[in-house]
Amino acid sequence: MLGIIEALINGVLMGSIYGLTAVGLTLIFGVMKVINFAHGSILMVGMFSAYWFVKLTGLNPYLAIPVVVPFLFYFGYFMQSWIIRPIFEAEKDVREPITVIIVTTGIWYVLDNLSLLFFGAEYRVVKTSVTGKIFEFYDMYFLLPKIIGAGITILCAIYLYWFLKHSKMGKAIRATSLDREAASLMGIKQSKIYNIAFGMGCACCGMAACVLIPFYYVYPTVGVPFDIKAFIIVVLGGLGSIPGAIIGGIIVGIIENVGAQFMASTWTELLLYGVFLFVLLVKPSGLFGMKQDF
Amino acid sequence: MKQLLNQKPIILLISALLLGALFILPLIVTSPSLMQIIILIVLYAYFTSTWNFVGGFAGVLPLGHSAFIGIGAYTSTVLFQTFGISPWFGMIVGGLLASLVGVIIGLPTLKLRGAYFALATIAVGEGMRVLFENVKQVGPFKINGPSGISLPLMESSFWTFQFGSKATYYYIILIMLLVVLLLTYFMMNSKVGYYLAAGGEEPEAAEALGIKVSRYKLIAMAISCFLAALGGTFYAQLMLYFYPKSIMGLDLSFEIAFIALIGGRGTILGPVLGALLLRPVSELTRIYLGASLPGLHLVIFGLILIVVMRYYPKGLVEPIKKLIDRFIHKPARGKADDPSNPSARQE
Amino acid sequence: MALLEVKNVTKRFSGLIAVNDVSMSVEEGQIVGVIGPNGAGKTTLFNCIAGALPPSSGSILFDGQEVAGKKPYQICQAGVTRTFQVVKPFATKTVLYNTVVGAFATTQHLHEAETKAIEVLKFLDLYNKRDVVSQSLTLPERKKLELARALATEPKLLLLDEVMAGLRPQEVTEMLPIIRKINETGVTIVIVEHIMQAIMNLSEKIYVISFGKKIAEGDPHDVVSDEEVIKAYLGDEYVATQH
Ligand SMILES: Nc1ncnc2c1ncn2[C@@H]1O[C@H](COP(=O)(O)OP(=O)(O)O)[C@@H](O)[C@H]1O
Ligand SMILES: [Mg+2]
């Protein structure tokens, strides 16, 4: 019984981190109606950045946040403005921007394999001041960095939610997600909104990367499982919904961790796909899906 | 058919010559390994052409096409191994099974925004791979989990779908490709083709014109999955060994989508052109640089894709066709280029 | 019996009643106008009739058959085709292709559909644009294409949603005889339009809608002199231009 509660809590902890990457994905989708298939690769870029930061400076891993998060923000900002924007604009009258979607998969391929070329296929771990630290609670054991990571993640999501609701830029972003022309009415260039939304989506990956680094391996295709989980999460939670992404993330984390008590991990993976398809079949708008033009 | 032959004589002549060249190719190419590369080009053109029915015409992006290829490969192989049923029959069974699965997935997702369909197909593709990796045996059928199936080497015969000479495989897949291209042509010039294109571009307007959009998309899905599975059986018989990652993975699904987009989705020759361009790139970099620079061919793939989408978002068929048009018209008109030439309506 | 019988149709969006208990009746062969200020609910009424939105309540009889809540393609197949105020061409396809899609409603064969489409394009004076990709058409041309596609389905009832909006006066004058000619081939027409001149000129009967409610109906000339209509919609401006 205790084992299950422990797994449940671990699921919530890990799930909130999945949730944060999914928040980035859902934010980009909400504004541009584009699924960023390179999202996992962006996370990989963030994890390698954080890895090298810690490895080279030997500093506390959480000090990487003020470096890696802005770096990924601009990485996303310029990726959108240099690579995606021209393609997006050529297709902006089209209801389904398929070309843009496929270009993000192209970016995925380039990033993952460049990192394979540079860093090789091996799994890397970096020993930090919190690595391996255990937090004990009623005979249950949790990794301290997981707890810290989940805490930071939740704070981050709350901040983002607040930012979108109350700041001027946030309002402009939300208006654009409802109506592509809206931004120009508010006196902000639409392409700038897209750049910023993309940048923020990638910054979420940067944050997730920094909190993962103390307890997770880095390797060139580390993004792929995160990517696929993020896809499942956004559909679970409802494409475009931020609370949905966090809660979807937690659900996925729980399925994975609690499932692992009863079956091999390859079966929990299958279970996730099953849940995903089930949601698509019965409630395609997801748990928190906004009414939208499917 | 009338329309097909109703082209300029010079184009008909060139097409006939090309076709003839394709059929005598095995007489010229004697190296089996080169033949293998050529067969794979044709096979990938075939895969991509089957993808085209949905990805090219229905306005959605399937990213799990390898699932159906895998269904084809596994079905015909286990039927042959367990009951000795000829892969030719197994091929049809696999096709029907793939069709069924495709329709079941398409039913809920083809009504939604394209993003959902893309995600759902990824999930199905990957889900199927994980499922096959987890399962060693289904009833009497051995599928061996992640280690896959290797077919026992049989006497070369039509019944066993195994042949001593690569040329036979080449002719089989070439004919399969030509049939699919012809099918594509007929579909594009039929009510189904027009309705699919309309529903893909503006579903609301299409419905207002009397089109049950989801029905036509489902028809396309059924055809596409059926044909993809046939290709899967061919792959199994050609390689005689396959495992879930080789035949149902994301990589294969993505490569097919990449070929389609680079060549030109929604066109007849796009998949062929895409395969002609990408397969050699991938084979050559793998052969010459694979050991020293792993993953380089995928970097090149990605870069080609990004650059082509940037400058030719409709794929390379369009500019290449223009180039050929110009080449053909040049001697006749005696003018270098004539942009005013009102080229043919619908391909 | 009327060809189209709309009875007490109401359409609610969360919190907003866009169409409020509207009834109307259209006889076979008529041209009926629907007018009302922006946001009055005219397009929403069309959406309900054409099946794009299910009405919240009420009944819609076409040819004696209940069509309320049916899908757009079913209603089109029954003989009602609508155009969109915000045009929705198949953007990457040519004018001819767009029209052929419409023409396939009555045939299985491409050559028959093409013959029909070409006939319609000639009729609407779009024939020489047949090979132009619809993306690159001007707005008036797109509006005409919208009409061409709809006409190619050979509807019994045509719902025209502001097909003349955005056209120059000269172009409007060209359009009027076309619409009348369509009507003369036996197509019943319900037309939503802002341009009074057009509506007055074409319609045998007018419905006026304001804030989702029908506030007047009848002969065009009687309706425009109705006090309430002038107040609600036409305003002083119209009264002024009358003299
Ligand atoms: N799909 C919808 N969801 C919510 N409100 C809508 C929708 N369609 C129209 N409305 C609202 O219904 C009202 C009537 O709109 P509409 O029928 O387009 O008016 P008209 O065509 O007469 O200009 C408007 O207030 C509009 O905002
Ligand atoms: Mg309107």
Image: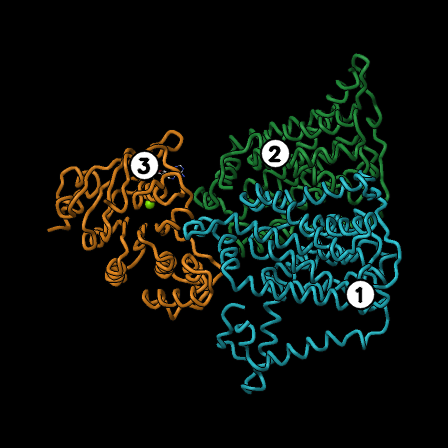
The quadrant where ligand 2 appears is top left
What hue represents chain A?
Answer: green
Mark 2 element type = helix
- Residue that label 1 marks: B37
Disc 3 vs disc 1: which is toward the camera?
3
Q: Is residue B10 above or below residue A12?
A: below
* Front position in the image: A184 or B256: B256
Q: Can residue C22 be seen in this view?
A: yes
Q: Are marks 3 and 1 on the same chain?
A: no
> Which amino acid type corresponds to the residue marked 2 in the rendered image?
Val
**Residue at 82% from the left image edge and 47% from the top image edge:** B82
Measured as percent of width and height from the top left, residue C187 is found at 28, 56
Mark 3 element type = strand
Marks 1 and 2 sit apart, C-alpha to C-alpha, by: 42 Å
In the image, taking residue A282 as reference, residue C106 lies left or right, namely: left
Q: The orange chain is which one?
A: C
Q: Which chain is home to disc 2?
A: A
The label on residue C59 is: 3
Q: Which chain is home to disc 3?
A: C
Measured as percent of width and height from the top left, residue B117 is found at 60, 45
Measured as percent of width and height from the top left, residue C145 is found at 38, 60
Neighbour tally class for label 2: few under 14, some 14-19, many 20 plus, Cα within 10 Å: some
Measured as percent of width and height from the top left, residue A147 is found at 74, 23
- Residue that label 2 marks: A279
Q: Do labels 1 and 2 share a chain?
A: no
Neighbour tally class for label 3: few under 14, some 14-19, many 20 plus, Cα within 10 Å: many
**Residue at 52% from the left image edge and 72% from the top image edge:** B3
Q: Which chain is cyan?
A: B
Q: In this view, does A20 lie above or below C131?
A: above
> Which amino acid type corresponds to the residue marked 1 in the rendered image?
Ile
